[in-house]
């Protein structure tokens, strides 16, 4: 009996030891701090979200939109975007492993929360992972690519996925105020563009954005009122040819022009036209000067019906804004249509 009781005690003690040993092995794993993804913000007023690096345009992200960074390859960074859209704007889809597709004609705004601030525009046909539904709204997520130069550097240290905590880059993030360093600071109208003004050493400047080794800054100061000439922010720039746009694309980005062009056809952008959204309608037209060749004029949804009534070889008077003076595929100007007169 004594031997039996001792055997039972030993067996029970071994079971207890085994029961204690397993959690003890797991303690280092359970107690390890979770990896924190690197969260950054869109630093530009608008940034194109693409399917692949330098690839198909999928959406447009507003300045300040937060993204989760995966990896950077050259000048491109793979990120996750997340937000809310009306549930009615999503149709079921299993393409490419996604669970939904934006079905709203002209696209659907992406919001920070249900009925919250707009953080971007998702194009019609944009594939999403549908994460949750709440009161007629759906939270969605998508992985894609943006330009590294469009992302603000975190102001605090971060822990990248799979790595150790590190300090933020020494490059100054947009929104920070700094001072001009040694020597005169020369402001250019665009990277490598014409000189606008020279700023003395020590003058406070505010960083607006960074792009390919250049930083756009804002300088504040005072001048005599009588020296100012009132201008319209929507003023039309006169005397600009298509050749000038191609030769100096950075100088004319965002400029408004009023042109008389020869309409040729209404087209839809193919995936390889990375200066457009996939399927975006555009006018194929001849520039005002026949020797300047072709121009592409992107048509917004509200002007599409008017564009569909145009006749081939018809001369039309249009108000446009320069999207790019030299497209990546064909090297011709791409303009956004604002009005047809």
Image (tube, rainbow, N blue to C red):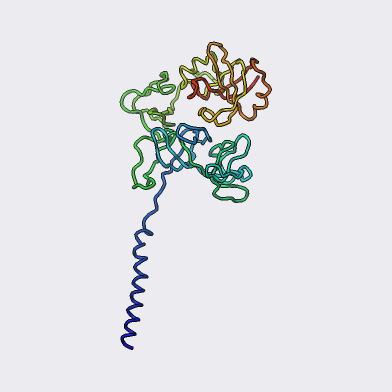
Location of residue 211 in the rendering, given as x and y in whole percent from the top left corner: 41, 29
Q: Is residue 23 visible?
A: yes
Tell me the quadrant of the picture where the N terminus can be found. bottom left
Quick check: 165 above or below 216?
below
Location of residue 91 in the rendering, given as x and y in whole percent from the top left corner: 61, 43
Tell me the quadrant of the picture where the C terminus can be found. top right
| Residue nearest the viewer, comparing 313 with 227 | 313
Location of residue 199 in the rendering, given as x and y in whole percent from the top left corner: 38, 23
| Residue nearest the viewer, comparing 29 with 41 | 29
Count the numbered circles shown: 0
Location of residue 90 by image quarter: top right
**Residue sitting at 45 percent across and 40 percent down?**
79
| Residue nearest the viewer, comparing 190 with 57 | 57
Q: Is residue 45 visible?
A: no
**Residue sitting at 43 percent across and 23 percent down?**
190
Residue furthest out toward the bottom: 1
Location of residue 12 in the rendering, given as x and y in whole percent from the top left corner: 36, 77
Residue furthest out toward the right: 309
């Amino acid at each position: 009996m004594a031997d039996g009781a001792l055997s039972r005690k030993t067996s029970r003690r071994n079971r207890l030891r085994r029961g204690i040993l397993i959690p003890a092995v797991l303690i280092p794993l359970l107690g390890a701090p979770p990896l924190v993804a690197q969260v950054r913000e869109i630093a530009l007023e608008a940034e194109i979200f693409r399917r692949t690096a330098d690839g198909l345009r999928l959406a447009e992200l507003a300045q300040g939109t937060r993204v989760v960074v995966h990896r950077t390859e050259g000048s491109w960074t793979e990120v996750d975007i997340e937000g809310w859209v009306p549930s009615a704007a999503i149709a079921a889809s299993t393409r490419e492993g996604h669970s939904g597709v934006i079905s709203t004609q002209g696209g659907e705004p992406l919001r920070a929360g249900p009925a919250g601030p707009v953080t971007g525009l998702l194009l019609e046909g944009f594939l999403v992972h549908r994460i949750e539904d709440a009161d007629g709204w759906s939270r969605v997520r998508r992985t894609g690519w943006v330009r590294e130069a469009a992302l603000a550097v975190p102001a605090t240290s971060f822990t990248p996925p799979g790595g150790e905590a590190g300090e933020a880059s020494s490059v100054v993030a947009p929104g920070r105020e700094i001072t001009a360093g040694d020597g005169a600071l020369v402001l250019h109208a665009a990277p490598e563009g014409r000189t606008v003004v020279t700023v003395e050493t020590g003058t406070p400047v505010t960083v607006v954005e960074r792009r390919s080794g250049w930083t756009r800054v804002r300088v504040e100061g005072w001048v005599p009122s009588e020296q100012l000439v009132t201008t319209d922010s929507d003023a039309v720039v006169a005397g600009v040819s298509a050749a000038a746009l191609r030769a100096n694309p950075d100088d004319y980005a965002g400029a408004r022009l009023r042109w008389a062009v020869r309409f040729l056809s209404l087209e839809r952008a193919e995936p390889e036209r990375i200066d457009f959204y996939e399927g975006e309608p555009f006018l194929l037209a001849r520039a005002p000067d026949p020797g300047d060749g072709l121009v592409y004029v992107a048509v917004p949804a509200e002007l599409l019906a008017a564009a569909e009534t145009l006749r081939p070889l018809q001369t039309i008077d249009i108000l446009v804004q320069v999207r790019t003076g030299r497209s990546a595929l064909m090297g011709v100007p791409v303009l956004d249509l604002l009005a047809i007169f």
